[in-house]
Image: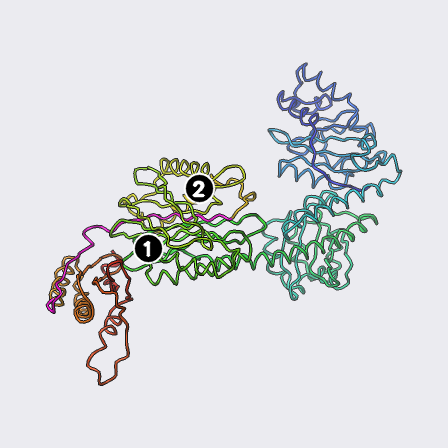
Amino acid sequence: MGAAAVRDGSSDTASGSLGLREEYGGADHPADSMPGAHRAPAALDSALATLHGIQEGLMTVGEDWRITFANEEAQGLLGDGCAPLVGSVLWEGPAGRLPGLEGQCRRVAAEGQPVGFLSHSPVDQRLHEVRLVPASRGGGLAVHFFDVADSPMDTFGSTAADTGKTGAVERPVRMSEVTAALAKAVTAADVVRVVEERVLPALGADGLLVQALDHDQLRLIGCVGYPQSFIEVVGTRLSPLAASPAVADVLRTGAPRFIESQAEYLRLYPNAKFLADASPKNAWVFAPLIASGRPIGSCVISFTRPRSFNDEERNLILALSGLLAQSLERARLYDMEHARAQELQRGLLPRALPRLPAVRAAARYLPASKSEKVGGDWYDVIPLSAERVAMVIGDVMGHGITEAATMGRLRTAVRTLADLELAPDELLYHLNELTSDLGEDCYVTCLYAVFDPAARTCSLSLAGHPSPVIVHPDGTVRCPELAADPPLGAAVPPFTIHELHLPEESILVFYTDGLVESATRDIEQGLVQLQQTLAHAVARATYFPTGRAGDGHDAAERRLGSLCDLVVSAMLPDTEQTSDDTALLIAHTRSTAPEDIASWSLPEHPCAAGQAREYVRKQLAVWDLNDCVMATELIVSELVGNVIRHGRGPIRLRLLRSASLVCEVYDGSLTTPRIRRATHTDEGGRGLQLVAALSRRWGARYLHDGKCIWTEQDLPVHVSAT
């Protein structure tokens, strides 16, 4: 007897009979004589009599695997007509001669899905399709036998009655199905899944191990039907090839090995007793996987019960191992390329977004499809001076390795230009020049925004990119109508700069068009859906700080991360069908409190430095930052003195207290301060060196009416800790 091709199926009749028995809670007539049996009602008797008379074999099995009903056809197919089937354990009676029945039944019980396979009747050797259907409630299953010889020819390609050579018919059907499925497999996991779904049921097997060979080391690729404890053994003690003698044998000889019992395994490999003890299996097929003339791994098919293998099964497994090896080698090459692409994407996107006083952010990136894990969408959050924060999101048109590389170049350029403290329109001007140099067919949409927590403003420029969505603390969601300039690579500067006035706290949602636009909706419909999703989300949960204990940085990031996930799941419920890359950046902005800002105007006179020192002493005393007084006095003296000597008014001094102490000196000159090397005999030229030594960092940013020289100092430990 040999099991043949497997295909999922269901039996309305079988499941209906089982449901009927469950509804009435009765037993069939042969079981009425068993202890504890209950007489079925008259309606059930009539239904069971009908089932007894149908021409297809039908049995029902309880949760304890005992047969609770068997019609006359099933009794004739499996029994000798004398010993009743009802009351016996399914695979301990005549049905136990059906290969793989026990394993298939346990699989159906575990997965709750119907399964079908072909096998021969132990009585007359006729080919039947065996369908196992789980009960809709209460446990148990139905077993349905369908005579293949009565089926139309296009169902199985040919029938046993037509050819008289059952084995020859079954094998091409199974091989063609497996070959077609393996041809569609992309990843190594897909290959393992094909073997699990199409090969194991056909052989009546219930265990699978697929391992790859890498420099005398075995790496587990897929595992089916084994407990976690055994998987841990395979992943550790069986990692060296020498620790798995059976696999080493088949890889050395190039021929599969069939082991029909644990006793045979221990006789062949007495030193591997630990493996036999850990394994719940009692029969194995060790098949080498050979591709391009070299071994690439092994496939182990196992069985819970001891069993023998006929010549047809051995030849079939030999052929399948060749197909599996070729598919696995192709899949491994894909997986390697796929892993490199993912590593490239991870390297190009921020590994983690910075934690900043004015902005907390979370982001998500989704590739265009399951097979393409890289693309040209990107996002970034960049700290600037005076606790200002730049937020950027962009989309290189197209998706793939080339677009990802272009994205990496542009992201690096944006960070470099942001360090120059350029305004959004100026930054896009330089980025447009770079994009044009990358080629005539390179186009990029981009949004660059700068949030100023002191002024509560967000300045931004858009190059062909959608406007952000703003969520207010009261739950209001709005999308400002901002005119976007053409995409980078096609734009003609100047770019328009927009200024948004934000409340004390707000949530800014930046996204690429892949989030709101698809084949089933236009961008306007998607934008409406996005706003509705955000409004519904903020109405049901709090995404703004509550002020309660423990509501710190981690809690804020978790809230924003959950909001990102909610938006993605609502806007892209089927991510595998996404036709474009998608980037999503959600930022929670916080303005600087008025009491943390101090500003003074200074005269264009040498006395300005003295006044600046006095202002600093008084304000730092108010802020309890007396430890910073001396260094800050020296800094403002040098910066104000430079303005008096080399610049022009108006002069303004500003102090900001945040995660650091920020000192800013504004003047009306556009001259660039530079540190120069002073010789031992020079009487000056060391002022900026002193400023750099006393500051954590310093720099200059240019305004439409002058410039600002700024410094940042670390706060004392007792202040920063609070």
Q: Against 231, is 204 above or below?
A: above
- SS type, badge 2: helix
Q: Nearer the viewer, residue 280 or 692?
A: 692
Chain-order first, disc 1 or disc 2: 1
Going by the image, does 536 lie left or right of 610?
Answer: right
Q: Mark 2 points at which residue?
A: 567
Q: Name the residue under label 1.
A: 389
- How far across and down, in percent of the image, does residue 48 sit? 72, 20
- Neighbor class of circle 2 (other Cα within 10 Å; few <14, some 14-19, many 20+) is many
Magenta highlight range: 581-607
Specify the quadrant that holds the C terminus: bottom left
Q: Which amino acid does label 2 sit on?
A: Val
Can residue 79 be seen in the rendering of this structure? yes
- How far across and down, in percent of the image, does residue 523 sit? 46, 40
Scheme by which the image is coloured:
rainbow
Q: Which residue lies furthest to the right in this view?
A: 164
The image quadrant that residue 639 belongs to is: bottom left
- SS type, badge 1: strand
Specify the quadrant that holds the N terminus: top right
Asked if residue 586 is among those painted magenta in the image, a careful observer would answer yes
Q: Which residue lies furthest to the bottom in this view?
A: 681
Q: Residue furthest front?
A: 492
Going by the image, does 693 lie left or right of 322?
Answer: left
State if disc 2 and disc 1 touch (CB < 8 Å): no
Q: Against 639, is 280 above or below?
A: above
- How far across and down, in percent of the image, does residue 167 sit? 84, 42
Q: What residue type is labelled 1?
A: Val
Mark on residue 131?
none
Q: Nearer the viewer, residue 583 or 73?
A: 583
The image quadrant that residue 168 belongs to is: top right
